[in-house]
Image (cartoon, helix red, strand yellow):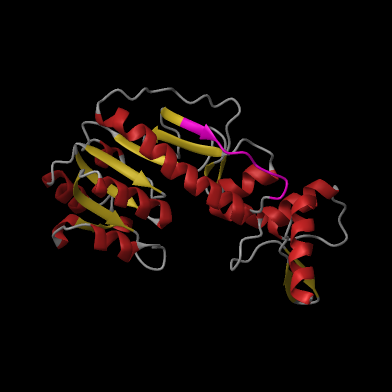
């Protein structure tokens, strides 16, 4: 399998690292430009490729870029936390198709911030490995696993759980893909939904004179608790006051109190 890899973020780095450890043939790579890139240098340090085999993800659908990728004769494309829609012309280069790992239980929460919307909307959370088509996380499903959302989860803690599940699922299913035995399960759109990056703006501002159910308000604040990023806020005069929520189970609180008590002695 001649792999053309398109990745970003910690998950992109970890899966690339694992593929190289498995001695897979990475013939080219596309990484995000700054400031959108995360773990760019770590990924580039893993691959032994000529500069002509390394691409700027923001130019991935240009005619000249597609021509250069075609010259690498890739058999499969892999996208991991990749922030760009792939064109039909680019997809046509991969005879084995292009696969993507997405941190949601598709068809729920296609697009941005699935960790946020699983908490706010109460939708299923998980990781999904699927084929890429020209839509937004809408291709046929290969495999998926659920991730439980606990009442103490924040946007940050759920995000890290989803990251870990993405890596685990990819490693588990890749041998099946490599052998050409991966299933294709069409997505059912009846209960699906999708979100853009800007959609969180609709929930971030908490109106102090508006009525909220307690669960709704707690879910918004905890879903948007992800330091150091801004999240839910209210206005005090002309100033924004941001909120972060910490949650802890009773039994863990008792353990924590015991630790503080030992320090005080």
- Where residue 234 appears, as percent x and y from the top left, is 77, 66
- Going 34% across and 37% down the picture, which residue do you hit? 99
Task: Relative to 1, say whether 56 is above or below.
Answer: below
Q: Which span is picked out in magenta?
A: 144-152
- Going 61% across and 28% down the picture, which residue do you hit? 191
Left or right position of 222 against 4: right
Left or right position of 228 against 51: right
- Tell me, yes or no, if residue 35 can be seen here: yes
Tell me the chief SS of the magenta region: loop
- Where residue 92 appears, as percent x and y from the top left, is 23, 35
Left or right position of 191 against 240: left
Quadrant containing the N terminus in the rendered view: top left
- Going 42% across and 35% down the picture, which residue do you hit? 129
Quadrant containing the C terminus in the rendered view: bottom right
Asked whether 260 or 227 is in front, the reply is 260
- Where residue 91 appears, as percent x and y from the top left, is 27, 38
Asked whether 196 or 104 is in front, the reply is 104
- Tell me, yes or no, if residue 196 can be seen here: no
* Residue furthest left as drawn: 71
Task: Relative to 248, say whether 132 is above or below.
Answer: above
Report which quarter residue 257 is drawn in.
bottom right
Q: Is residue 149 magenta?
A: yes
Q: Is residue 14 magenta?
A: no
Total residue callouts:
0
- Where residue 148 appears, as percent x and y from the top left, is 62, 39
Report which quarter residue 57 is drawn in.
bottom left
């Amino acid at each position: 399998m001649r792999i053309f890899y398109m990745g970003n973020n910690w998950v992109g780095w970890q899966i690339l690292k694992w593929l190289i450890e498995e001695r897979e043939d990475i013939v080219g790579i596309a990484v995000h430009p700054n400031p959108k890139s995360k773990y760019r240098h770590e990924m580039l340090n893993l691959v032994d490729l000529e500069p002509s085999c390394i691409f700027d993800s923001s130019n991935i659908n240009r005619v000249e870029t597609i021509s250069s990728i075609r010259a690498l004769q890739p058999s499969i494309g892999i996208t991991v936390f990749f922030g760009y829609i792939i064109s039909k012309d680019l997809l046509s280069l991969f005879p084995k198709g292009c696969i993507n790992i997405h941190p949601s239980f598709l068809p729920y929460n296609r697009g941005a911030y699935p960790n946020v919307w699983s908490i706010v909307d109460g939708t299923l959370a998980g990781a999904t490995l699927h084929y890429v088509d020209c839509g937004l996380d809408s291709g046929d499903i290969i495999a998926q696993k659920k991730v439980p959302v606990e009442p103490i989860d924040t946007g940050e803690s759920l995000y890290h759980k989803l990251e870990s599940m993405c890596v685990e699922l990819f490693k588990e299913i890749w041998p099946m893909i490599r052998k050409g035995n991966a299933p294709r399960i069409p997505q059912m759109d009846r209960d699906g939904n999708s979100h853009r990056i800007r959609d969180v703006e609709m929930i971030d501002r908490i109106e102090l004179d508006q009525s909220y159910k307690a669960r709704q308000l707690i879910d918004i604040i905890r879903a948007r608790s992800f330091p150091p990023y801004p999240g839910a806020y209210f206005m005090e005069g002309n100033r924004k006051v941001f909120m972060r929520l910490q949650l802890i189970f009773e039994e863990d609180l008792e353990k924590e109190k015991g630790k503080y008590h030992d320090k005080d002695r």
